[in-house]
């Protein structure tokens, strides 16, 4: 079976909020949480807000114009909205049909199960989402490439919301860092999957661009090299979902109430990053590791082992050092598989070009099994869940953005990541990656992979270890992170509804 474009569903792109399937990708993003004090006034205000919500269609067209450097969109402000279960309850909405248990609890109630630090059953580091009282009823996502335009629009929205019985309870601003890095210095946002689905144009066009030479046998499986095409029901309700055994064969949409159609589940995690501690770990551990191995390992090399990529984005499996010819090429920077991969042809600038493959690294000698990018996405490798195709079932659409200043500019300031990810099952997607893989030293591949030393949690913040299999020295060495470099400071499980849902409030 081959998936033809006409086999893919036409998306209700004008009804689906735009940060889910397409992503704002703005330089700045405000997250503003509200508690509902007056349900009747709030309902009317939210209904009117529907006209300001940025759809997938709008965001898609906005990003195309931005790529063409059209000046009229430089100060555009994009807006999306999400609700906690408690916000829906405040609006007298019947949430009894919701099956996903994560949506029914404040994040703090599940902190222990998520691996977050707890004491007496309560999260110790949360600044929001510890309980219902400090979980936003409504979370607005407001983004722009223009700092001043965003500040003015956010202030206007907060003011009008207050007059309608919506009290601001939380706010954070994210800002893209130079060269698309996160605060530890590694380029981020490289490996997002591509949602299948068509925009209702004449003729219908795919939301995710297709770059693979049609003559390639995997042309219907990839958007660009290394970017799997995923059936949209993994991210938005009402559409076909992914198969565990055949990525070409769509499965029935997830069961959900009719009112959730064209909506998504959104997990928000506020993650604090301790850059000084991470740098000290790289410096101290690279010294002891060099002594154990009998060869020099510097901090950058250790960082590439922990992350799975060099700071510029070059995959560790592809190169023993940063390589600009790889990291600067969007067709090469994500084209790899741990079982090895053949060369592939792409059509770029109306010319057929060949992207090189590489040999296997099943043993984890170039990219360790505990590397962050391998723990959350083992790609083609069998896991404790099944064959490699299972991995695609767990992927989410990540839309996070850093917050806070660069460490070298203001070391004492708080900084981190506003982690945002869209899916249609918290239990089958977020929990699998977070709890069953990142926080589990015995998964996903071998049974002794070690913790995800970058972001994995163990519940008490104590040391976490992972084995480095080194063929050169013919020894196994334990790498130990003495404390957590990333600390969850709260968040929420939310529902991001369709625009028509808002209009019908």
Image (cartoon, rainbow, N blue to C red):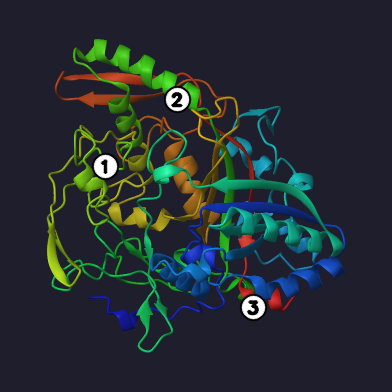
Question: Which residue is the site of mark 3?
Answer: 500
List x then y, in percent, for residue 170: 72, 47
Picture residue at 29% right of the left edge, 16% below the top? 289
Confirm or deny contact between disc 2 and disc 3 (CB under 8 A): no
Question: Which residue is the site of mark 2?
Answer: 278
In the foreground, 282 or 3 = 282
Please tell me which of labels 2 and 3 falls first in the chain. 2
In the foreground, 78 or 70 = 70
List x then y, in percent, for residue 89: 77, 62
Rounded to the nearest angstrom, the CA distance separating label 2 from label 1 is: 20 Å
Quadrant assignment for the C terminus: bottom right
Determine which quarter of the picture holds residue 117. top right
Label 3 Cα crowd, 10 Å radius (few <14 / some 14-19 / many 20+): some
Residue 1 appears in the figure:
no
List x then y, in percent, for residue 213: 17, 70
Residue that sits furthest to the front in the current view: 71
> Considering only vertical position in the picture, is 393 above or below 468?
below
Picture residue at 58% right of the left edge, 45% below the top? 269
Rounded to the nearest angstrom, the CA distance separating label 3 from label 1 is: 42 Å
Please state if 42 lies on the left or on the right of 456 as rendered: right
List x then y, in percent, for residue 388: 28, 52
Picture residue at 64% right of the left edge, 78% below the top? 500
Rounded to the nearest angstrom, the CA distance separating label 2 from label 3 is: 45 Å
- Mark 1 falls on what kind of element? loop
Residue 395 appears in the figure:
yes
Question: Which residue is the site of mark 1?
Answer: 314
- Mark 3 falls on what kind of element? helix
């Amino acid at each position: 079976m081959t998936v033809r474009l006409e086999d893919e569903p036409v998306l209700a792109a004008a009804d689906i909020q735009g940060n889910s399937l397409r992503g704002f990708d703005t330089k700045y993003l405000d997250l503003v949480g509200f508690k509902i004090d007056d349900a009747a006034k709030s309902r009317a205000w939210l209904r009117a807000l529907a006209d300001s919500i940025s759809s997938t269609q709008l965001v898609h067209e906005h990003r195309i114009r931005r790529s063409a450097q059209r000046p009229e969109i430089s100060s555009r402000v994009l807006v999306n909205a999400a609700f906690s279960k408690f916000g829906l309850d405040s609006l007298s909405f019947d949430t009894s049909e919701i099956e996903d248990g994560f949506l029914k609890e404040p994040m703090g109630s599940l902190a222990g199960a998520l691996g977050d630090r707890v004491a007496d059953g309560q999260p110790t580091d949360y600044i929001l989402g510890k309980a219902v009282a400090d979980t936003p009823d409504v979370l607005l996502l407001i983004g722009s490439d223009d700092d001043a335009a965003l500040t003015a629009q956010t202030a206007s929205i907060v003011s009008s919301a207050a007059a309608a019985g919506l009290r601001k309870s939380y706010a954070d601003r994210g800002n893209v860092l130079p060269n698309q890095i996160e605060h530890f210095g590694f380029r981020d946002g490289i490996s997002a999957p591509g949602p299948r689905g068509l925009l209702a144009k004449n003729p219908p066009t795919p939301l995710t661009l297709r770059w693979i030479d049609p003559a390639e046998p995997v042309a219907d499986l990839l958007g660009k090299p290394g970017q799997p095409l995923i059936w949209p029901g993994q991210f938005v309700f009402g559409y076909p979902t992914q198969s565990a055994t055949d990525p070409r064969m769509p499965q029935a949409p997830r069961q959900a109430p009719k009112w959730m159609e064209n909506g998504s589940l959104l997990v928000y995690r506020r993650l604090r990053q301790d850059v000084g501690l991470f740098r000290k770990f790289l410096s101290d551990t690279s010294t002891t590791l060099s002594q154990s191995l009998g060869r020099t390992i510097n901090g950058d090399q250790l960082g590439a082992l922990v992350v799975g990529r060099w700071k510029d984005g070059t995959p560790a499996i592809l190169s023993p050092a940063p390589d600009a010819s790889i990291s600067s090429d969007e067709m090469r920077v994500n084209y790899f598989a741990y079982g090895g991969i053949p060369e592939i042809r792409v059509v770029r600038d109306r010319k057929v070009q060949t992207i090189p493959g590489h040999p296997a690294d099943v043993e984890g000698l170039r990219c360790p099994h505990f590397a962050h990018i391998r723990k959350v996405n083992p790609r083609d490798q069998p896991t404790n869940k099944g064959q490699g195709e299972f991995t695609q079932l767990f992927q989410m659409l990540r839309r996070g953005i850093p917050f806070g200043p660069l460490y070298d500019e203001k070391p004492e300031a708080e900084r981190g990541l506003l982690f945002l990810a869209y899916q249609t099952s918290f239990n089958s997607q977020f929990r699998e990656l977070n709890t069953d893989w990142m926080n589990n030293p015995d998964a996903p591949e071998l049974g002794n992979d070690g913790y995800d030393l970058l972001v994995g949690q163990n519940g008490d913040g104590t040391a976490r270890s992972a084995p480095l299999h080194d063929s050169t020295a013919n020894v196994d060495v334990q790498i130990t992170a003495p404390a957590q470099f990333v600390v969850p400071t709260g968040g929420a499980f939310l529902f991001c509804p369709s625009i028509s849902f808002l209009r019908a409030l």
